[in-house]
Image: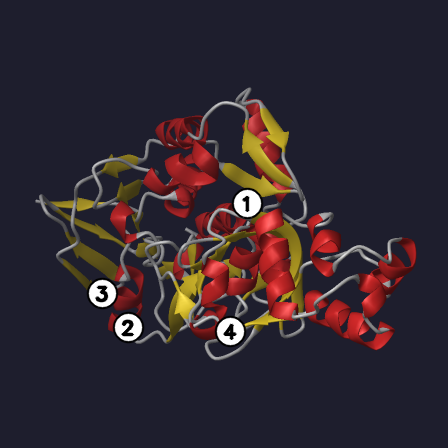
Amino acid sequence: MTEIYDAIILGAGAAGLFCAAEAGLRGRKVLLVDHAEKVGKKILISGGGRCNFTNLGIAPDRYLSANKHFAKSALSRYTAGDFIALVDSYGIAWHEKTLGQLFCDGSARQIVDLLLDRCAQGNVTIKTSEVVRDIAHGDGRYTVSLTSFTAQAPALVVATGGPSIPKMGATGFAYEVARQFGLKVVQPRPALVPLTLAGEDLLFRELSGVATDVVARSGKTAFKEAALFTHRGMSGPAILQISSYWQSGEAVHIDFCPGHSADWLVEAKAASPKATIRQTLRERLPQRLADVLDEKLGLEGILAAQSDKALRAAEARLAAWAFHPNGTEGYAKAEVTAGGVSTAELSSKTLESKRVPGLYMIGEAVDVTGWLGGYNFQWAWASGWAAAQAL
């Protein structure tokens, strides 16, 4: 027996749940399917279990895509303010941490419960532990063969995300569906991911556990946040952010003394001529990091013994210390996936395929990747909402 729906949504993560609820509330008969035993698994672990559900600084230029304009339509029509109003309507208390990041005071479970309640109001049929065996398209309908039944609908929404965090069941399934229907895929890669170090940078791995505020740069892009040294390389918010922009073979430049005046070491020599570089760095940086940087700078003796030229060279190096990552920690540690279904294939207004009527791609499956801090959740809500209005 084949079950008939108005829309079949594959993937019960943030984008899929929200799209299903919004379509259901518009009176559509919706089937939401996931291969996992429970819905919203990534939501539950996000933000340290408190779900960084959006950001007050949402703007299209904070998203990476081959088409930097693609996200504008959806983000402008379903805003952070819209989702905050929804959270408020459920009495969910929240707080802003840093840089506009909003978290639940309680638990990420509150966001999942909100989405499930909205799905229930929209009479959405939710089926978990269902693996897609086959997808066929003909006569204006999609036929999806699942583990225990078959469903048909004129619309199919793919919201299965990317392959980041495979231990949560993440796969590249969305790309398989895209290719089945002839849609181009921008090469996926891990994003918001720790970088690994080797070669001359190995010394810094000995600083595992040391964190400090820096400015991390790759090309013309820079982020001022904390960096953390790990036993494999570098992590922390500044590094995760810059990893999305970093290309293999390029250097990442770190400013270890952001906010310092241009001649701060020269000024330090005038103020404390008998101090050493190491002592001066220890006043500004964690001791272990200061000692390693001092060793690499190689300026022996007290500040008074150094020429202004040598001190300015040290300042310049500390302001743009070049690291040469040999890779990343991969999808296992990546918070999201960059790349994905090409935006050239999709309508920016509805997220529907331009060439295959009734086929929609939303959320992380699409080549739209946000900054760290709630941006990717907002893309999930906005893209899910945009597709739901067209179903």
Dot 1 alpha-carbon crowd within 10 angstroms: few under 14, some 14 to 19, many 20 or more: many
Labels 3 & 4 near each other (Cβ < 8 A):
no
For discs 4 and 2, the disc positioned in front in the rendered view: 4
Q: Position of residue 276 (x, y in %)?
A: 75, 58
Marks 1 and 4 sit apart, C-alpha to C-alpha, by 28 Å
Labels 1 & 3 near each other (Cβ < 8 A):
no
Q: Amino acid at mark 3?
A: Asp
**Nearer to me, 258 or 97:** 258
Marks 2 and 1 sit apart, C-alpha to C-alpha, by 29 Å
Marks 2 and 3 sit apart, C-alpha to C-alpha, by 20 Å
Q: Callout 4: helix, strand or loop?
A: loop
Marks 4 and 2 sit apart, C-alpha to C-alpha, by 35 Å
Q: Say whether disc 1 or disc 4 marks the residue closer to the N-terminus.
A: 4
Task: Give the residue number, with chain letter if any, for mark 1.
Answer: 374
Q: Residue at x 22, y 65 (%)?
A: 139
Marks 1 and 3 sit apart, C-alpha to C-alpha, by 40 Å
Q: Position of residue 368 (x, y in %)?
A: 50, 62
For discs 2 and 3, the disc positioned in front in the rendered view: 2
Q: Amino acid at mark 1?
A: Gly
Residue 313 appears anywhere in the view? yes
Q: Amino acid at mark 2?
A: Arg
For discs 1 and 4, the disc positioned in front in the rendered view: 4
Task: Give the residue number, with chain letter if any, for mark 3.
Answer: 139
Task: Give the residue number, with chain letter if any, for mark 4.
Answer: 324
Q: Say whether disc 1 or disc 3 marks the residue closer to the N-terminus.
A: 3
Q: Callout 2: helix, strand or loop?
A: helix
**Nearer to me, 110 or 32:** 110
Q: Say whether disc 3 or disc 4 marks the residue closer to the N-terminus.
A: 3
Task: Give the residue number, with chain letter if any, for mark 2.
Answer: 179
Q: Callout 1: helix, strand or loop?
A: loop
Q: Residue at x 63, y 35 (%)?
A: 97
For discs 3 and 4, the disc positioned in front in the rendered view: 4
